[in-house]
Every structure is written in C-alpha cells, then in structure tokens.
Amino acid sequence: MNRRPGGETKTRRGTTARMNRRPGGENEDAARHHGEMNQRRGGNEDAARHHGENEPETGGGNEDAAQPPLKRSRSRSDVSNHLGLDGSNMETTTAGGSAADERRTSNYSSRQRMDSLRKIRPPFPWFGMDIGGTLVKLVYFEPKDITAEEEQEEVENLKSIRRYLTSNTAYGKTGIRDVHLELKDLTMCGRTGNLHFIRFPTQDLPAFLQMARNKHFSSLHTTLCATGGGAYKFELDFRQMADLQLLKLDELDCLIRGVFYIDSVVSSPSECYYYENPTDPEHCVQKPFPLENPYPVLLVNIGSGVSMLAVYSKNNYKRVTGTSLGGGTFLGLCCLLTGCSSFEEALEMASQGESTRVDKLVRDIYGGDYERFGLPGWAVASSFGNMVCKEKRESISKEDLARATLVSITNNIGSITRMVALNENIERVVFVGNFLRVNTLSMKLLAYAMDYWSKGQLKALFLRHEGYFGSVGALLELLDPS
C-alpha cells in the first residue's frame, strides 16, 4: 500500500488504515445490523461477521499524530463470504476434473454470484446520515420504479415515511429539504428514484428521534448507517429513544466516497465549478470544471472545524492538517458580537457590513503598500486590529463586526490551505462543507486569495452539494459495503 510522509494513508477498498481501530475487535451493532439485513434478504452470517470485524471503534478524529494499525487485505474468500458464496454453497472440481467441468462450475458460480448480489440489496427505506457538530445531514432515496406487486405488499409505515419526507420541504421548525439539490431519476443498487437532501440542527436531534419513534421506523430498520462525531456521541440516544442501532462509519472515508460518487452522476449543471477572474469583481463569473481526473487534489472540508485531505486517488488519501477555526467559530462569534441566532442571519449581516472599519490593514501601518515584501495596502495586517481604539469601536456596526468575522475565518482557512498545497505540491483545491452553503462571500474570498497569493498557480474549486457528501458516503456503504 502506498504511504506518503506527513500523515496516514487511507484506502477505501483493500487495505485500509482507520483511526483508533481495535485490531480483531467486533462491533456487536454492526454484526446485528448485517445479520438482520441478510436474514431479510436470504443471505448468511458471513456478511455480518465481515462488517463486525471491519467496524472502527472510534471516528476519523483530528489528531495528526494518530498512526492507526493497518487493516488486513480482503482475500478472495472474504469477498466470497461477504456475498454469501462460501465453499459450502459452491461446486468444486477435483485436480483431475475436465475443462468442461470447470466451465460448468464457473457458469454456476457466476449465476449464484448474481443471485447473491440481488439478495444483499437492503430493504427500504434507504438513508445515509452525517451527524456533525452543528448540523445533521440526511440523504433519502425515494424509489420511483415500485411495481404493483411491491406497492400491494408495502407496509403502511414505509408509505407514511415516504409521503412525509417527499411531500414536505420543511420539518418542524428547523428541518429543511434542499429541493434545489435533489437528484432525479438516479439509479442506485439497481433501483431508479430520486435522492433527497435534508438538514437540521444537531441540537434538534431529539425531535428527529421522536419522529422516527412515532412513525415506527424501527419496525422497518433497526440499524442506520451514520457517520460524523455524532454517530458516536448520540449512539445511546438512538437506542433508547428510537430503538435504532447505528452502524458507525469513518467520516473521512464517507466524505471522499460521497464527493466522487456525486460528481460522477451529476452532469448538468456541473457539480464542480470555479470562479473565473476572481481578482476582478466586475468580471468574476462562475464556470463549470470537469473533475474526472483531478489528482492530486487538496480537499478542504469546512464544517464546524476544518480538515484538509491530500487525495492522490479515489482510494488513497491522507489527512494533512486542520484548524479549529471554522464555520462553528464564525457562527459562535457572530452570536456573541451581533446577537444573531442563525447562520443565515449572520451571513445576511456580513453581506451588509464593511470589514475594513474593524480590521487594521497594511496601509494603516505603512501608509500604503509594503513593497519590499509585496504586501498590498489593502491586505489585512491585523484582524479586528482597529478595535483597540475606543472611538472606532463606537463607530462600527453589528454588520461590520459580522463581515470582519467572516473575513477573518475565511482568510485563516485560505492561508493554511495555500501553505498545505505548496508543501504537498498540489495545484487544485476543492472546498466543501456547510460553511459554504449560501455563502458566496467566502467562496469568492477563497477564490481570490488562492489566485492572488499563488500568482495564478492555485485554483479554488467548489461543489454544489457542499455539506452532504458524508451522508452520501454513508448511504453508499449501506448499498455497497466496502
């Protein structure tokens, strides 16, 4: 397996290094989950054992020093067992068997493999969850190719859940379905349907669990595929409040898998885009960018905090570093400084403010550019530096404070990103995460910073489904366990 200096290498298939994995340990919940799924689909217990063995004990984590043990490579027998094709179910040939015998056995095995693949398709409903520090992201696959026979056999609980999720765009006071992100006529695991994207604040998770209990969700599933730190933090709540088990998945594995899957199935408009002429506000326009072969690429995930991943292929990446100053910092400081109560409100205030009244610029110190080191006069020398002066504190508005907070957080992320890209010799940077949701200000700031300070060498790329890739990766694990 390829390893690179400066961080752990992770692979999604084959040998995989996971954070804090207990060697040889089994996860009882995962085993119960896959055992139940195989009972429903006619599978065997090997798949349950397989997932129990590969369940990580803790999440992705943010500690750069963590050096996890390697997971063993999956052998042919592992794959056979995972698909329900253990030796007891297969014809074999002796050493002296004829070529015709071998061909018959091969044909029989192929047919049995296809039958087993159909059997491992999980029952509806299909969900993937990413429980973050600020938001819960949920993806739901709505089948549109239900046959008359299936509809007749479909239980009322399943119909009720589908109607509730697809006929509403808001759930309670804070749940939102992002209709503009919906993917229609998508084929997943042999079924055609629509993929819905739903979010709500993590603090409202108890209301979600109560809804799941009221709709008797556990009668359809007892296990959900979930990622993010909340999959560990709230595991007991899922058990006690909704009678649900969580199959906990590594958040960075899910993120990588989700990014490349969504990019592969979205064609128009392009999932990936960039800003052309970011240093010229009057001519700055959004342009599509093909992401077919981007490697190596630096993936910057901006959620409550920030993680930066150097990705060398779909199955090979490492977490280089991160920062605690992310979207959660922006919202928290805005709540303290302005009295706002939501991310959307904070962004609206920032759009109307002027950060230069709060920040101390290079020209405030030098009277102009610092030419010797190429620092323009408009560059920020000290974030919030003007606030040491009482007169200036009294002259600024809440909108100015919100804008300065946004600029400070964004500039810090951009600065670290640029240093990491230079150290890793990577020219493409993809920014994802819910901090960028409806946040054109930060996207243009990042695009400008990457282009200006690298003299055009670094390109900042963005994705339309921003913060949902982890939940998509969790859904893919449900449908096609890696």
Image (tube, rainbow, N blue to C red):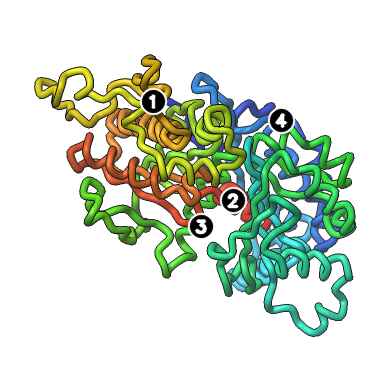
| Image position, residue 211 (x, y; %) | 83, 53
At mark 4, the secondary structure is loop
N-terminal-most mark, 2 or 1: 1
Type of residue at label 2? Gly
Q: Nearer the viewer, residue 60 or 140?
A: 140
Circle 4 crowding by C-alpha within 10 Å: few under 14, some 14–19, many from 20: few
N-terminal-most mark, 2 or 3: 3
At mark 1, the secondary structure is loop
Type of residue at label 1? Pro
Closer to the eye: label 2 or 4: 2
Q: Where residue 24 is drawn, which disc sits there?
A: 4
Type of residue at label 4? Gly
At mark 2, the secondary structure is helix
User: Which residue is denoted by mark 2 in the rendering?
Assistant: 473
Residue drawn at point x = 82 percent, y = 47 percent: 209
Mark 2 vs mark 3, CA separation in Å: 8 Å
Mark 2 vs mark 4, CA separation in Å: 24 Å
Type of residue at label 3? Tyr
Circle 2 crowding by C-alpha within 10 Å: few under 14, some 14–19, many from 20: many
Q: Nearer the viewer, residue 141 or 253?
A: 141
Proximity of marks 2 and 3: CB atoms separated by less than 8 Å: yes
Q: Where residue 261 is drawn, which disc sits there?
A: 3
User: Which residue is denoted by mark 1 in the rendering?
Assistant: 5
Q: Nearer the viewer, residue 434 or 147?
A: 434
Up-down relation of residue 190 to residue 465 (above or below): below
The quarter holding residue 450 reads top left
Closer to the eye: label 3 or 1: 3
